[in-house]
Amino acid sequence: MVSKGRRLLDNLPADFTSFVDRRLELAEIKRLLSLARLVTLTGVGGVGKTRLALRAATDLRRAFADGVWMVDLAALGDPELLVHAVAEQLDVSDQSARPLLTVLSEHIADKQMLLVLDNCEHMLDACARSAHALLRASPGLRILSTSREALGVYGEHVLAVHPLSVPTESQENATPSAAVALFAERAAAVVPGFGVTPDNAAIIERLCQRLEGIPLAIELAAARMRVMSVQNLLTRLDDRFQLLSGGPRTMPHRQQTLRALMDWSRDLCSPEEQMLWGRLSVFYGSFDLGAAEEVCSLGGLPRESILDLLIQLVEKSILVRDEASPDRYRLLETIRQYGAELLSGSGEVTPLRRRHRDYYEGLVVRAEAEWFGEHQLEWTTRLWCEHANIRAALDFCRTEPGEAEAGLRMAAALRMYWLGSGLIREGRGWLDRLLPLHTKPTPVRAKAMWLNTWLSLLQNDEATALPMLKASRALAEQLGDTSALAYVAQITGLAEFRGDLPATVALFDEALAHHRAVGDLMGVAYALIRLATTSILLDDADRALAYCEECAALSASHGETWFKAHALWMMGIAVWRQGDHRRAAALEQESIQVKAAFHDQVGVAIGIEVLAWIAATDRQSERAATLFGALETIWRPTGMSLFNFMTSYHDECQQRTQEILGDQRYESAFGHGTRFAVEAAISFALDDKLDSAAVPAKSEAESCPLTRREMEIAELVAQGLSNKEIAAALVIAPRTAEGHVEHILAKLGFTSRAQIAAWAVEHGRQWSRNG
């Protein structure tokens, strides 16, 4: 069980099948990572690069204080999104206007972590540039990448991943090769009781030889055991590989071998299955049955046939079910690429991509229409699941002539997804790309313009926002678009928030009237909250409370929670101003719980901010200082600064707290808060007690990066013992001793045993004293 305050330090998926052989490769990867900061695993598709990288990363978890993190790039079609993908996995939700690579570099600057970049081959330049920049920014970073080609970065160490060992004539009566072991295990999974016997051993060995030990090829072949014997498999494979077997018996190009296997797998499918395989290649990431039925059911494949065909493709290991969501499916990237080639000769690529776009456009438009309701959190979760497909649909709109308006319609319909899920930067990025491609004065462009203005303001990019706001107003007036005029009024009020407050109130009142006129419930809720904010600034807590209660009642009547949480946040400020601190804290805590469910880090941060004010006002100074410290950790990844109207309260409460505690006690409590992960900060904010156990103070010994056993081994290294001698001294296996030394090298960032020895001499006495 993970203790309170401790964050999970990796995102590696669990293995669902056993890992066959690869011991030597794993040891070499660990050795290389102790010597180099960038290691790339190369090899053909299907050779097992990803699986090997994941196993190595799993084994190295304890060697990196800030964790090991995997970023799968296969679903990314646009290299510009690479840094976004890395930032998402590292939970860096910066929404400022600064370059994201700069933000990410700052975030990892002092980290000791391993980053796994998987499937780099389709964006080598972007991967190389990003890897180079990140490695320069963080001395403690190691990168393990997988690609069919080396990245070409200075200092990169490349390890070619070869196929599994296959039987040779000299192996007769010896232990089965890794390829045979893999085939036998995977075949037993589909044919219970299957095993290698004297009767079938020679055929299986021949089959593995013909497949050249490529793991994906072996697994696909083993899956065919559902419908045919090993002999039949070998016969069909030999027939299909006739072209590759002619001439000298030299090793053929492995990509050709894999392609031949794909051709063979294709021929085992019916024409309808082949057609669906190709059409499914337009999906990225995972998809569900409804999406497949809607997108793929055109000429030759009626809608009612899709389910049965999907089942058949799953049974033939062409399609896999998503382990995290059993109702969703995906194509492994190698198989998806082959499917794309099948589709390329059909003349259906553009029509299929347009149908794919139409489906996801319809999905996001429906999500927007139903977002202010009881299924709000479900829609947010659904959009998270479809993120890769949404990106693909938007990219089609960006690159296909004449489709930009549909792209703007999609990007604008996703407004609450961008705003409510910490994706302000990405939302603005799509709007920035699409707006220049569709310049006709249409309501779609008007909506995209005011939304982009809003996102720019949230990033504090007034230089871009203010001219765009002026253009948005002009277009809305030209079109007579009441809805757009309402949002322009709201955004104008936001832009002038610290100026003439009565004028700002008039703008929000104007917006509220327009929103009510067109029945825009989200607009009404936003306007009510902003009117509450201005009332607070005008020192009218009663009026602010009335606006908040109206907003909360509106939300409750529709089963909506996100705006209600926002209203509760502002209500907490109003109640605090009235002096009811206990109720104010309860309101803020309820708001934080809802915002956390939406992954709305900004919403969480502003709620914790108010709890810090309440604690300061109640002279719970140590708690207040800890919350202020926690806020440093929460705000920094968003790239946003505290809302303008909150800064005076923040400064006043922080100064009061520091005066009460004194500099030393304040810095101690503040530093305690900065060590919270976001989850721990939320837990602390929801608890009235100062939980000092959440982040225990570290003793000198605990601050050592090595475990007690590793420190013991480091001292033996310092004494000049070899791995074999260390193993004998500690009564452990030589390989265990070797593994410990590799972990020590990786943790300390060293490349030689001499460095370990020098470090151990320096730290050993301190460890013994504190241990």
Image (cartoon, rainbow, N blue to C red):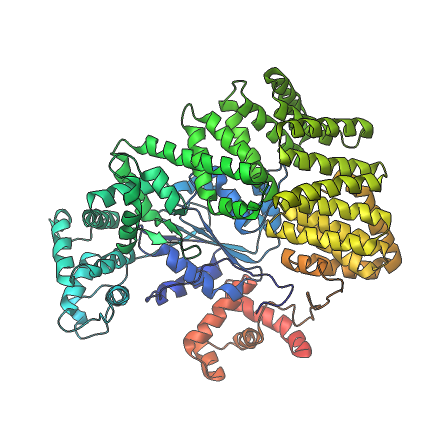
Residue positioned most to the top: 478
Left-right relation of 447 to 563? left
Res. 454 in view? yes
Residue positioned most to the front: 557
Residue plotted at (78% across, 39% down) = 645
Residue 589, image x, y percentages: 71, 54
Left-right relation of 532 to 231? right
Q: Does residue 383 sit above or below 695 in this rendering?
A: above
> Residue 290 appears in which quarter of the rendering?
top left
Left-right relation of 695 to 735? right
Nearer the observer, 189 or 72: 189
Nearer the observer, 472 or 24: 472
Residue 595, image x, y percentages: 64, 49
- Name the image quarter holding the C terminus: bottom right
> Residue 166 appears in which quarter of the rendering?
bottom left
- Name the image quarter holding the N terminus: bottom right
How many numbered discs sit on the rendered protein?
0
Nearer the observer, 762 or 316: 316
Residue plotted at (24% across, 73% down) = 175
Nearer the observer, 555 or 184: 555
Residue 445, image x, y percentages: 55, 24
Res. 640 in view? no
Residue 171, image x, y percentages: 19, 71
